[in-house]
Image (spheres, rainbow, N blue to C red):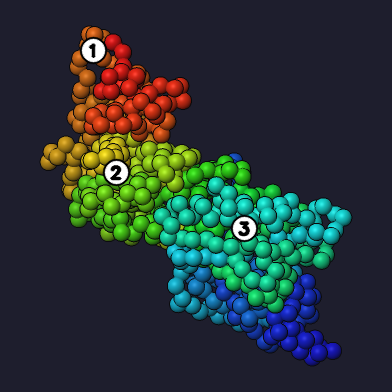
Protein backbone atom coordinates (compact mmCIF):
# COMPACT_ATOMS: atom_id res chain seq x y z
CA UNK A 1 0.00 0.00 0.00
CA UNK A 2 2.87 2.36 0.78
CA UNK A 3 4.41 1.86 -2.67
CA UNK A 4 1.17 2.66 -4.45
CA UNK A 5 0.72 5.87 -2.46
CA UNK A 6 4.28 6.99 -3.22
CA UNK A 7 3.85 6.19 -6.89
CA UNK A 8 0.54 8.07 -7.05
CA UNK A 9 2.10 11.06 -5.30
CA UNK A 10 5.05 11.25 -7.69
CA UNK A 11 2.83 10.76 -10.73
CA UNK A 12 0.42 13.49 -9.68
CA UNK A 13 3.30 15.95 -9.29
CA UNK A 14 4.69 14.98 -12.66
CA UNK A 15 1.38 15.66 -14.36
CA UNK A 16 0.94 18.94 -12.43
CA UNK A 17 -2.65 18.00 -11.64
CA UNK A 18 -2.45 17.96 -7.85
CA UNK A 19 -4.71 20.33 -5.92
CA UNK A 20 -3.85 21.90 -2.58
CA UNK A 21 -6.05 19.51 -0.62
CA UNK A 22 -4.78 16.46 -2.51
CA UNK A 23 -1.20 17.54 -1.91
CA UNK A 24 -1.73 17.93 1.82
CA UNK A 25 -3.44 14.58 2.04
CA UNK A 26 -0.84 12.73 0.01
CA UNK A 27 2.14 14.46 1.59
CA UNK A 28 0.99 13.49 5.07
CA UNK A 29 1.42 9.84 4.06
CA UNK A 30 4.88 10.15 2.53
CA UNK A 31 6.93 9.17 5.57
CA UNK A 32 10.15 7.73 4.19
CA UNK A 33 9.57 8.70 0.55
CA UNK A 34 13.00 9.55 -0.92
CA UNK A 35 12.10 11.82 -3.85
CA UNK A 36 12.64 15.59 -3.99
CA UNK A 37 11.62 18.62 -6.00
CA UNK A 38 12.98 22.10 -6.72
CA UNK A 39 11.20 25.36 -5.98
CA UNK A 40 11.93 29.10 -6.12
CA UNK A 41 12.01 30.84 -2.74
CA UNK A 42 10.01 34.05 -2.36
CA UNK A 43 9.66 36.62 0.38
CA UNK A 44 5.93 37.34 0.58
CA UNK A 45 4.83 40.70 1.97
CA UNK A 46 1.46 41.66 3.42
CA UNK A 47 -0.06 45.04 4.18
CA UNK A 48 -2.53 46.62 6.56
CA UNK A 49 -4.36 49.99 6.66
CA UNK A 50 -2.86 53.06 8.38
CA UNK A 51 -2.65 52.74 12.15
CA UNK A 52 -2.53 48.94 12.12
CA UNK A 53 0.28 46.82 13.51
CA UNK A 54 3.03 45.76 11.14
CA UNK A 55 2.90 42.37 9.42
CA UNK A 56 6.06 40.32 9.26
CA UNK A 57 6.82 38.90 5.80
CA UNK A 58 7.05 35.15 5.43
CA UNK A 59 8.87 32.70 3.19
CA UNK A 60 7.18 30.71 0.44
CA UNK A 61 8.47 28.44 -2.30
CA UNK A 62 6.99 28.10 -5.80
CA UNK A 63 7.44 24.78 -7.60
CA UNK A 64 7.41 25.53 -11.32
CA UNK A 65 7.09 21.87 -12.28
CA UNK A 66 3.98 21.70 -10.09
CA UNK A 67 2.27 24.57 -11.92
CA UNK A 68 3.72 27.19 -9.54
CA UNK A 69 2.22 25.43 -6.53
CA UNK A 70 3.26 27.61 -3.59
CA UNK A 71 4.34 26.15 -0.26
CA UNK A 72 4.54 28.05 2.99
CA UNK A 73 7.94 27.47 4.61
CA UNK A 74 7.83 26.87 8.36
CA UNK A 75 10.32 26.04 11.10
CA UNK A 76 13.89 27.30 11.47
CA UNK A 77 13.56 29.55 8.42
CA UNK A 78 15.63 32.58 9.44
CA UNK A 79 18.68 30.50 10.31
CA UNK A 80 18.45 28.41 7.15
CA UNK A 81 18.28 31.48 4.87
CA UNK A 82 20.51 33.69 7.03
CA UNK A 83 23.08 34.27 4.27
CA UNK A 84 20.69 34.20 1.32
CA UNK A 85 19.15 37.22 -0.38
CA UNK A 86 15.68 35.72 -0.58
CA UNK A 87 14.09 39.05 -1.56
CA UNK A 88 15.99 38.90 -4.86
CA UNK A 89 13.73 36.11 -6.10
CA UNK A 90 16.81 34.26 -7.38
CA UNK A 91 17.16 31.66 -4.60
CA UNK A 92 16.15 28.08 -5.43
CA UNK A 93 16.05 25.14 -3.06
CA UNK A 94 15.81 21.37 -3.42
CA UNK A 95 13.28 19.93 -0.97
CA UNK A 96 12.77 16.27 -0.08
CA UNK A 97 9.15 15.14 -0.09
CA UNK A 98 9.71 13.92 3.45
CA UNK A 99 9.95 17.60 4.50
CA UNK A 100 6.30 18.26 3.55
CA UNK A 101 4.25 18.65 6.72
CA UNK A 102 0.69 17.56 7.38
CA UNK A 103 -0.68 20.97 6.38
CA UNK A 104 1.19 20.85 3.05
CA UNK A 105 3.99 23.18 4.18
CA UNK A 106 7.76 22.79 3.87
CA UNK A 107 9.16 22.15 7.35
CA UNK A 108 12.77 23.12 8.06
CA UNK A 109 14.32 21.47 11.12
CA UNK A 110 17.54 19.66 12.06
CA UNK A 111 16.38 16.48 10.36
CA UNK A 112 15.08 17.90 7.07
CA UNK A 113 17.59 20.73 6.53
CA UNK A 114 20.46 18.30 5.99
CA UNK A 115 18.64 16.98 2.91
CA UNK A 116 17.95 20.45 1.48
CA UNK A 117 20.25 22.48 -0.76
CA UNK A 118 20.23 26.04 -2.07
CA UNK A 119 21.27 27.38 -5.48
CA UNK A 120 20.95 30.65 -7.38
CA UNK A 121 19.07 31.42 -10.56
CA UNK A 122 21.10 34.04 -12.43
CA UNK A 123 18.10 35.44 -14.26
CA UNK A 124 17.52 39.19 -14.27
CA UNK A 125 15.47 40.74 -11.50
CA UNK A 126 11.87 41.75 -12.17
CA UNK A 127 11.75 44.54 -14.75
CA UNK A 128 9.33 47.47 -14.51
CA UNK A 129 9.72 48.55 -18.13
CA UNK A 130 7.90 47.61 -21.31
CA UNK A 131 4.51 45.93 -21.55
CA UNK A 132 3.13 43.74 -18.76
CA UNK A 133 -0.08 41.76 -19.14
CA UNK A 134 -2.10 41.37 -15.95
CA UNK A 135 -4.69 38.63 -15.51
CA UNK A 136 -7.33 39.41 -12.87
CA UNK A 137 -8.81 36.18 -11.49
CA UNK A 138 -12.18 36.55 -9.79
CA UNK A 139 -12.42 33.54 -7.48
CA UNK A 140 -16.19 33.63 -7.18
CA UNK A 141 -18.93 31.00 -7.01
CA UNK A 142 -21.58 32.83 -9.01
CA UNK A 143 -24.12 29.98 -8.67
CA UNK A 144 -23.87 29.67 -4.90
CA UNK A 145 -26.65 30.87 -2.61
CA UNK A 146 -23.94 31.81 -0.10
CA UNK A 147 -22.97 35.40 -0.89
CA UNK A 148 -19.81 35.05 1.18
CA UNK A 149 -18.34 32.98 -1.66
CA UNK A 150 -18.90 35.71 -4.26
CA UNK A 151 -16.83 38.69 -5.39
CA UNK A 152 -18.65 42.02 -5.01
CA UNK A 153 -17.15 43.49 -8.21
CA UNK A 154 -18.48 42.28 -11.56
CA UNK A 155 -16.05 41.45 -14.36
CA UNK A 156 -16.87 44.79 -15.97
CA UNK A 157 -16.20 46.73 -12.77
CA UNK A 158 -12.93 44.87 -12.24
CA UNK A 159 -11.84 45.84 -15.75
CA UNK A 160 -12.61 49.50 -15.11
CA UNK A 161 -11.08 49.50 -11.62
CA UNK A 162 -7.78 47.95 -12.77
CA UNK A 163 -7.33 49.24 -16.32
CA UNK A 164 -9.80 51.97 -17.29
CA UNK A 165 -10.69 54.41 -14.48
CA UNK A 166 -9.01 57.78 -14.08
CA UNK A 167 -6.79 56.43 -11.30
CA UNK A 168 -5.90 52.74 -11.06
CA UNK A 169 -3.07 50.22 -11.39
CA UNK A 170 -2.50 50.90 -15.08
CA UNK A 171 -2.80 54.69 -14.93
CA UNK A 172 -0.52 55.19 -11.90
CA UNK A 173 2.32 53.17 -13.40
CA UNK A 174 1.87 54.78 -16.81
CA UNK A 175 2.05 58.32 -15.38
CA UNK A 176 4.85 57.68 -12.90
CA UNK A 177 7.02 55.82 -15.42
CA UNK A 178 6.64 58.47 -18.10
CA UNK A 179 4.89 55.81 -20.24
CA UNK A 180 7.85 53.42 -19.92
CA UNK A 181 5.71 50.81 -18.14
CA UNK A 182 2.59 49.81 -20.02
CA UNK A 183 0.19 47.55 -18.10
CA UNK A 184 -2.36 45.86 -20.36
CA UNK A 185 -5.18 43.34 -19.81
CA UNK A 186 -4.23 39.69 -20.30
CA UNK A 187 -5.81 37.83 -23.21
CA UNK A 188 -6.72 34.20 -23.89
CA UNK A 189 -9.20 31.43 -23.20
CA UNK A 190 -12.15 32.62 -21.13
CA UNK A 191 -10.59 36.04 -20.47
CA UNK A 192 -12.77 39.12 -20.96
CA UNK A 193 -10.79 42.37 -21.05
CA UNK A 194 -8.16 41.02 -18.68
CA UNK A 195 -10.60 39.38 -16.23
CA UNK A 196 -11.61 35.74 -15.78
CA UNK A 197 -14.02 34.20 -13.26
CA UNK A 198 -13.26 30.78 -11.77
CA UNK A 199 -15.20 29.01 -9.05
CA UNK A 200 -13.35 27.05 -6.39
CA UNK A 201 -16.33 24.63 -6.36
CA UNK A 202 -16.23 24.28 -2.59
CA UNK A 203 -16.67 26.30 0.59
CA UNK A 204 -13.40 28.25 0.79
CA UNK A 205 -14.32 30.40 3.79
CA UNK A 206 -11.53 30.17 6.40
CA UNK A 207 -9.28 28.30 3.96
CA UNK A 208 -5.87 29.94 3.46
CA UNK A 209 -5.73 32.28 0.47
CA UNK A 210 -2.59 30.41 -0.64
CA UNK A 211 -4.38 27.05 -0.68
CA UNK A 212 -7.25 28.53 -2.70
CA UNK A 213 -4.81 30.09 -5.19
CA UNK A 214 -2.98 26.77 -5.63
CA UNK A 215 -6.17 25.02 -6.69
CA UNK A 216 -7.04 27.82 -9.14
CA UNK A 217 -3.54 27.67 -10.67
CA UNK A 218 -4.24 24.07 -11.60
CA UNK A 219 -7.31 25.14 -13.58
CA UNK A 220 -5.43 27.98 -15.26
CA UNK A 221 -2.81 25.49 -16.45
CA UNK A 222 -5.17 24.14 -19.09
CA UNK A 223 -6.03 27.55 -20.53
CA UNK A 224 -4.02 29.36 -23.17
CA UNK A 225 -3.64 32.78 -21.54
CA UNK A 226 -1.05 35.44 -22.35
CA UNK A 227 -0.01 37.02 -19.04
CA UNK A 228 3.03 38.18 -17.10
CA UNK A 229 1.29 38.81 -13.76
CA UNK A 230 -1.73 37.32 -12.02
CA UNK A 231 -3.91 39.14 -9.51
CA UNK A 232 -6.18 36.86 -7.48
CA UNK A 233 -9.30 38.56 -6.11
CA UNK A 234 -10.98 36.34 -3.52
CA UNK A 235 -13.89 36.54 -1.08
CA UNK A 236 -13.29 38.33 2.20
CA UNK A 237 -14.18 35.18 4.15
CA UNK A 238 -10.98 33.46 3.00
CA UNK A 239 -8.24 33.22 5.64
CA UNK A 240 -6.01 36.19 4.77
CA UNK A 241 -3.36 35.30 7.36
CA UNK A 242 -3.91 38.62 9.15
CA UNK A 243 -3.26 40.83 6.11
CA UNK A 244 -5.31 43.05 3.83
CA UNK A 245 -3.42 41.80 0.74
CA UNK A 246 -0.27 39.82 -0.11
CA UNK A 247 2.31 39.72 -2.91
CA UNK A 248 5.63 38.08 -3.75
CA UNK A 249 8.78 40.20 -3.85
CA UNK A 250 10.28 39.88 -7.35
CA UNK A 251 7.41 37.61 -8.31
CA UNK A 252 4.30 37.62 -10.46
CA UNK A 253 1.39 36.89 -8.08
CA UNK A 254 -0.72 39.24 -5.96
CA UNK A 255 -3.62 38.27 -3.68
CA UNK A 256 -6.34 40.77 -2.71
CA UNK A 257 -9.69 40.39 -0.89
CA UNK A 258 -12.71 41.76 -2.73
CA UNK A 259 -13.16 44.60 -0.22
CA UNK A 260 -9.79 46.09 -1.25
CA UNK A 261 -9.57 45.07 -4.90
CA UNK A 262 -10.87 48.37 -6.31
CA UNK A 263 -8.39 50.54 -4.38
CA UNK A 264 -5.39 51.93 -6.32
CA UNK A 265 -3.56 52.05 -2.97
CA UNK A 266 -3.65 48.26 -2.72
CA UNK A 267 -3.28 47.44 -6.43
CA UNK A 268 -0.21 49.63 -6.98
CA UNK A 269 1.41 48.72 -3.66
CA UNK A 270 1.13 44.96 -4.22
CA UNK A 271 2.36 45.16 -7.80
CA UNK A 272 5.27 47.20 -6.45
CA UNK A 273 6.27 44.12 -4.46
CA UNK A 274 6.23 42.08 -7.68
CA UNK A 275 8.66 44.62 -9.15
CA UNK A 276 11.06 44.02 -6.27
CA UNK A 277 10.19 46.74 -3.75
CA UNK A 278 9.62 46.42 -0.04
CA UNK A 279 7.87 48.86 2.27
CA UNK A 280 8.53 52.56 2.84
CA UNK A 281 8.84 53.47 6.52
CA UNK A 282 8.47 56.77 8.35
CA UNK A 283 8.49 57.76 12.01
CA UNK A 284 8.71 54.18 13.24
CA UNK A 285 5.92 52.78 11.05
CA UNK A 286 7.01 50.36 8.33
CA UNK A 287 4.15 51.61 6.13
CA UNK A 288 4.28 55.24 7.29
CA UNK A 289 5.88 57.01 4.30
CA UNK A 290 3.24 59.34 2.86
CA UNK A 291 5.32 60.36 -0.17
CA UNK A 292 4.86 57.14 -2.14
CA UNK A 293 2.77 54.06 -2.82
CA UNK A 294 5.03 51.63 -0.93
CA UNK A 295 3.76 53.16 2.29
CA UNK A 296 0.05 52.82 3.06
CA UNK A 297 -0.95 56.47 3.48
CA UNK A 298 -2.78 56.92 0.16
CA UNK A 299 -6.59 57.04 0.66
CA UNK A 300 -8.10 53.54 0.71
CA UNK A 301 -10.85 54.44 -1.78
CA UNK A 302 -11.72 53.75 -5.41
CA UNK A 303 -10.32 57.18 -6.31
CA UNK A 304 -7.03 56.83 -4.42
CA UNK A 305 -4.58 59.63 -5.23
CA UNK A 306 -2.43 60.78 -8.13
CA UNK A 307 1.04 60.26 -6.68
CA UNK A 308 4.09 58.08 -7.26
CA UNK A 309 6.93 56.68 -5.11
CA UNK A 310 9.71 58.01 -2.90
CA UNK A 311 13.18 58.78 -4.25
CA UNK A 312 14.72 55.40 -3.34
CA UNK A 313 11.97 53.42 -5.07
CA UNK A 314 12.00 55.68 -8.14
CA UNK A 315 15.78 55.30 -8.40
CA UNK A 316 15.54 51.52 -8.47
CA UNK A 317 12.58 51.54 -10.86
CA UNK A 318 15.01 53.30 -13.21
CA UNK A 319 12.40 55.11 -15.29
CA UNK A 320 14.36 58.38 -15.43
CA UNK A 321 17.86 57.00 -15.00
CA UNK A 322 19.24 59.44 -17.56
CA UNK A 323 18.53 62.13 -14.94
CA UNK A 324 20.03 60.23 -11.98
CA UNK A 325 23.23 61.33 -10.28
CA UNK A 326 25.48 59.56 -7.76
CA UNK A 327 27.69 61.57 -5.43
CA UNK A 328 30.30 60.42 -2.90
CA UNK A 329 30.42 63.33 -0.42
CA UNK A 330 33.79 62.14 0.98
CA UNK A 331 35.34 63.02 -2.39
CA UNK A 332 33.32 65.94 -3.71
CA UNK A 333 30.80 68.50 -2.57
CA UNK A 334 27.71 68.85 -4.73
CA UNK A 335 25.44 71.58 -6.04
CA UNK A 336 22.52 70.56 -8.25
CA UNK A 337 18.93 71.44 -9.10
CA UNK A 338 16.37 68.71 -8.31
CA UNK A 339 13.39 68.48 -10.67
CA UNK A 340 10.13 66.74 -9.76
CA UNK A 341 8.86 63.64 -11.52
CA UNK A 342 6.15 65.53 -13.43
CA UNK A 343 8.47 67.99 -15.13
CA UNK A 344 11.13 65.32 -15.65
CA UNK A 345 8.60 63.23 -17.59
CA UNK A 346 6.99 66.06 -19.54
CA UNK A 347 9.71 68.71 -19.92
CA UNK A 348 12.97 66.82 -19.56
CA UNK A 349 14.21 68.47 -22.75
CA UNK A 350 14.60 71.69 -20.72
CA UNK A 351 16.88 70.06 -18.14
CA UNK A 352 20.59 70.83 -18.25
CA UNK A 353 23.38 68.77 -16.70
CA UNK A 354 22.80 70.70 -13.47
CA UNK A 355 19.22 69.38 -13.31
CA UNK A 356 18.63 65.90 -11.87
CA UNK A 357 15.51 64.00 -10.90
CA UNK A 358 17.12 61.93 -8.11
CA UNK A 359 20.49 62.15 -6.39
CA UNK A 360 22.00 59.19 -4.57
CA UNK A 361 24.53 59.91 -1.82
CA UNK A 362 26.86 56.95 -1.53
CA UNK A 363 29.30 56.53 1.34
CA UNK A 364 32.72 54.93 1.10
CA UNK A 365 31.94 53.28 4.43
CA UNK A 366 30.14 49.96 4.74
CA UNK A 367 28.22 51.30 7.74
CA UNK A 368 26.21 53.96 5.89
CA UNK A 369 23.20 53.12 3.73
CA UNK A 370 22.60 55.17 0.62
CA UNK A 371 20.57 58.38 0.87
CA UNK A 372 18.26 59.40 -1.99
CA UNK A 373 17.14 62.98 -2.61
CA UNK A 374 14.27 64.20 -4.77
CA UNK A 375 12.05 67.25 -5.16
CA UNK A 376 8.59 66.05 -4.14
CA UNK A 377 6.88 68.48 -6.50
CA UNK A 378 3.09 68.43 -6.23
CA UNK A 379 2.52 68.45 -9.97
CA UNK A 380 1.48 66.16 -12.82
CA UNK A 381 1.56 62.46 -11.83
CA UNK A 382 2.38 63.54 -8.25
CA UNK A 383 -0.30 66.24 -8.00
CA UNK A 384 -2.14 64.60 -5.08
CA UNK A 385 0.85 63.40 -3.06
CA UNK A 386 -0.23 62.71 0.52
CA UNK A 387 2.70 64.27 2.38
CA UNK A 388 5.73 66.60 2.26
CA UNK A 389 4.59 68.23 -0.96
CA UNK A 390 6.93 70.72 -2.64
CA UNK A 391 9.89 69.85 -0.42
CA UNK A 392 13.21 68.11 -0.88
CA UNK A 393 12.69 64.66 0.64
CA UNK A 394 15.58 62.50 1.86
CA UNK A 395 15.09 58.72 1.98
CA UNK A 396 17.48 56.00 3.16
CA UNK A 397 17.66 52.53 1.61
CA UNK A 398 20.32 49.83 1.64
CA UNK A 399 19.70 48.05 -1.67
CA UNK A 400 17.20 47.47 -4.46
CA UNK A 401 14.89 45.07 -2.59
CA UNK A 402 15.32 46.60 0.87
CA UNK A 403 12.84 48.63 2.88
CA UNK A 404 13.31 52.39 2.80
CA UNK A 405 13.16 54.91 5.64
CA UNK A 406 12.11 58.56 5.44
CA UNK A 407 14.80 60.79 6.96
CA UNK A 408 13.78 64.42 6.39
CA UNK A 409 11.80 66.87 4.26
CA UNK A 410 13.44 70.24 3.60
CA UNK A 411 11.70 73.48 2.75
CA UNK A 412 13.67 76.43 1.36
CA UNK A 413 16.55 77.28 3.70
CA UNK A 414 16.32 74.10 5.76
CA UNK A 415 19.30 71.85 6.48
CA UNK A 416 19.65 68.14 7.24
CA UNK A 417 22.75 66.84 9.02
CA UNK A 418 23.85 63.29 9.69
CA UNK A 419 26.83 62.48 11.89
CA UNK A 420 29.05 59.44 11.46
CA UNK A 421 29.20 59.62 7.68
CA UNK A 422 32.05 57.93 5.88
CA UNK A 423 35.11 56.07 7.09
CA UNK A 424 36.17 58.93 9.37
CA UNK A 425 32.74 59.65 10.82
CA UNK A 426 32.31 63.19 9.47
CA UNK A 427 29.06 65.15 9.49
CA UNK A 428 27.08 65.10 6.26
CA UNK A 429 25.20 68.30 5.38
CA UNK A 430 22.32 68.63 2.89
CA UNK A 431 20.69 72.03 2.42
CA UNK A 432 17.79 73.24 0.30
CA UNK A 433 18.94 76.64 -1.01
CA UNK A 434 15.55 77.48 -2.49
CA UNK A 435 13.16 76.91 -5.37
CA UNK A 436 12.88 78.00 -8.99
CA UNK A 437 9.34 78.11 -10.33
CA UNK A 438 8.18 76.67 -13.61
CA UNK A 439 7.96 79.05 -16.53
CA UNK A 440 6.54 78.68 -20.02
CA UNK A 441 6.71 80.92 -23.06
CA UNK A 442 9.79 82.44 -24.69
CA UNK A 443 12.15 81.63 -21.79
CA UNK A 444 10.83 78.35 -20.36
CA UNK A 445 12.16 76.86 -17.13
CA UNK A 446 11.44 73.73 -15.14
CA UNK A 447 10.45 73.97 -11.49
CA UNK A 448 13.36 72.87 -9.32
CA UNK A 449 14.94 72.90 -5.88
CA UNK A 450 18.59 73.95 -5.62
CA UNK A 451 20.49 71.81 -3.13
CA UNK A 452 24.03 71.59 -1.81
CA UNK A 453 25.71 68.55 -0.23
CA UNK A 454 29.05 68.41 1.58
CA UNK A 455 30.96 66.99 4.53
CA UNK A 456 31.50 69.51 7.28
CA UNK A 457 35.07 70.76 7.28
CA UNK A 458 36.06 68.70 4.23
CA UNK A 459 34.16 69.22 0.96
CA UNK A 460 32.38 72.51 1.64
CA UNK A 461 29.66 74.05 -0.52
CA UNK A 462 27.44 77.04 0.18
CA UNK A 463 24.25 78.51 -1.19
CA UNK A 464 25.90 81.91 -1.81
CA UNK A 465 29.15 80.55 -3.26
CA UNK A 466 31.32 81.44 -0.25
CA UNK A 467 34.24 79.16 0.61
CA UNK A 468 34.25 79.37 4.42
CA UNK A 469 32.97 76.62 6.65
CA UNK A 470 32.72 77.69 10.28
CA UNK A 471 31.76 74.19 11.33
CA UNK A 472 28.43 75.44 12.67
CA UNK A 473 25.73 73.98 10.50
CA UNK A 474 22.00 74.09 10.90
CA UNK A 475 20.11 71.52 12.90
CA UNK A 476 18.39 68.53 11.37
CA UNK A 477 15.72 69.67 8.92
CA UNK A 478 13.11 67.73 10.89
CA UNK A 479 13.33 70.36 13.61
CA UNK A 480 12.64 73.50 11.59
CA UNK A 481 14.13 76.03 9.20
CA UNK A 482 17.78 76.77 9.82
CA UNK A 483 20.34 78.81 7.97
CA UNK A 484 23.85 77.63 7.22
CA UNK A 485 25.19 78.83 10.57
CA UNK A 486 22.51 77.23 12.72
CA UNK A 487 20.34 80.30 13.33
CA UNK A 488 16.64 79.71 13.15
CA UNK A 489 15.13 81.16 9.99
CA UNK A 490 11.45 80.58 10.76
CA UNK A 491 10.65 84.10 11.87
CA UNK A 492 11.21 86.10 8.72
CA UNK A 493 13.30 86.47 5.59
CA UNK A 494 16.89 85.49 6.34
CA UNK A 495 20.01 85.59 4.25
CA UNK A 496 22.55 82.77 4.23
CA UNK A 497 24.23 84.01 7.41
CA UNK A 498 21.00 84.02 9.37
CA UNK A 499 20.61 87.82 9.45
CA UNK A 500 17.16 89.20 8.98
CA UNK A 501 17.03 90.50 5.43
CA UNK A 502 13.78 92.42 5.84
CA UNK A 503 14.88 95.70 7.38
CA UNK A 504 12.14 97.87 5.89
CA UNK A 505 9.21 99.40 7.75
CA UNK A 506 6.20 97.27 8.47
CA UNK A 507 3.85 99.67 6.69
CA UNK A 508 3.45 99.61 2.92
CA UNK A 509 4.00 103.40 2.59
CA UNK A 510 1.43 103.57 -0.18
CA UNK A 511 3.21 100.99 -2.29
CA UNK A 512 1.26 98.33 -4.18
CA UNK A 513 0.79 95.05 -2.30
CA UNK A 514 -0.16 91.69 -3.81
CA UNK A 515 -3.24 90.02 -2.38
CA UNK A 516 -1.87 87.65 0.32
CA UNK A 517 -1.87 83.97 -0.59
CA UNK A 518 -3.07 84.45 -4.15
CA UNK A 519 -2.41 81.75 -6.72
CA UNK A 520 -4.46 80.80 -9.74
CA UNK A 521 -6.46 77.65 -10.45
CA UNK A 522 -3.41 75.55 -11.34
CA UNK A 523 -1.86 75.62 -7.88
CA UNK A 524 0.51 77.31 -5.46
CA UNK A 525 3.37 77.57 -7.97
CA UNK A 526 1.33 80.01 -10.06
CA UNK A 527 1.31 83.01 -7.73
CA UNK A 528 2.16 86.68 -8.29
CA UNK A 529 5.90 85.94 -8.35
CA UNK A 530 5.33 83.51 -11.20
CA UNK A 531 3.33 86.09 -13.17
CA UNK A 532 6.10 88.59 -12.53
CA UNK A 533 8.69 86.53 -14.41
CA UNK A 534 7.66 88.04 -17.77
CA UNK A 535 5.17 90.68 -18.85
CA UNK A 536 3.45 88.48 -21.41
CA UNK A 537 2.27 86.10 -18.66
CA UNK A 538 -0.15 88.75 -17.38
CA UNK A 539 -1.40 89.39 -20.91
CA UNK A 540 -1.85 85.73 -21.81
CA UNK A 541 -3.06 84.27 -18.49
CA UNK A 542 -3.79 87.10 -16.09
CA UNK A 543 -7.43 87.62 -17.04
CA UNK A 544 -8.79 84.12 -17.65
CA UNK A 545 -7.44 81.76 -14.93
CA UNK A 546 -9.23 82.61 -11.66
CA UNK A 547 -8.62 80.91 -8.33
CA UNK A 548 -11.31 79.21 -6.26
CA UNK A 549 -12.55 82.63 -5.07
CA UNK A 550 -12.88 83.93 -8.63
CA UNK A 551 -9.86 86.24 -8.28
CA UNK A 552 -7.55 86.62 -11.29
CA UNK A 553 -3.92 87.75 -11.47
CA UNK A 554 -4.84 91.06 -13.12
CA UNK A 555 -6.81 91.86 -9.96
CA UNK A 556 -4.52 90.30 -7.34
CA UNK A 557 -0.97 90.99 -8.54
CA UNK A 558 0.78 94.34 -8.73
CA UNK A 559 2.89 93.20 -11.67
CA UNK A 560 -0.34 92.65 -13.65
CA UNK A 561 -1.89 95.98 -12.69
CA UNK A 562 -3.84 94.67 -9.71
CA UNK A 563 -3.10 94.44 -6.00
CA UNK A 564 -3.98 97.01 -3.34
CA UNK A 565 -2.41 99.98 -1.53
Q: Position of residue 82 (x, y in %)?
A: 51, 68
Residue 540 location, quadrant = top left
Q: Which residue is tagged 2?
A: 446
Q: Which residue is tagged 3?
A: 246
- Helix, strand or loop under label 2: loop
Residue 35 location, quadrant = bottom right
Q: Position of residue 180 (x, y in %)?
A: 42, 60
Mark positioned earlier in the residue sequence (1 or 2): 2
Count the labels in the image: 3
**Residue found at the very far bottom of the displayed protein:** 3
Q: Which residue is tagged 1?
A: 511
Q: Position of residue 553 (x, y in %)?
A: 34, 24
Residue 83 sits above or below residue 488 on the image? below
- Helix, strand or loop under label 1: loop
Q: CA distance from mark 1 to mark 2?
A: 31 Å
Residue 480 location, quadrant = top left
Mark positioned earlier in the residue sequence (3 or 2): 3
- Helix, strand or loop under label 3: strand
Classed neighbour count for the residue bearing mark 2: other residues with Cα under 10 Å, few (<14), some (14–19), many (≥20): many
- Check the picture and name the quadrant holding the N terminus: bottom right
Residue 524 sits above or below residue 309 on the image? above
Amino acid sequence: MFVSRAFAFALSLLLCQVTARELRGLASNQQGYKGSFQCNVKLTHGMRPPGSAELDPFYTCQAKEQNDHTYFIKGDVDSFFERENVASGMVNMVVPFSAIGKAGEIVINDETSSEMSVSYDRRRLASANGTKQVLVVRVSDELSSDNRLKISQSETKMYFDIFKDENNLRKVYKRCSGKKLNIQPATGDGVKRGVITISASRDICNESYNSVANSIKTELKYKNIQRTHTMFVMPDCVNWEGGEAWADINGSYTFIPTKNASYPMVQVHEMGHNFGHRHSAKNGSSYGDDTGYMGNQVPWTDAGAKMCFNAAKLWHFGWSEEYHWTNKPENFGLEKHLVGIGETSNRGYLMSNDHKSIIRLESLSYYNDDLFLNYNHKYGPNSEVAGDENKVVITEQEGRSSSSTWKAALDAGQTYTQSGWGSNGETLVVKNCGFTKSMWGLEPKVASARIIVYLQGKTYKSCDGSSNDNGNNGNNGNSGNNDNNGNNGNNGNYDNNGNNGNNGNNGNNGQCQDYPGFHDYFGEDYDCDWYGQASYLCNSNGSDIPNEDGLIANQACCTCGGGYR
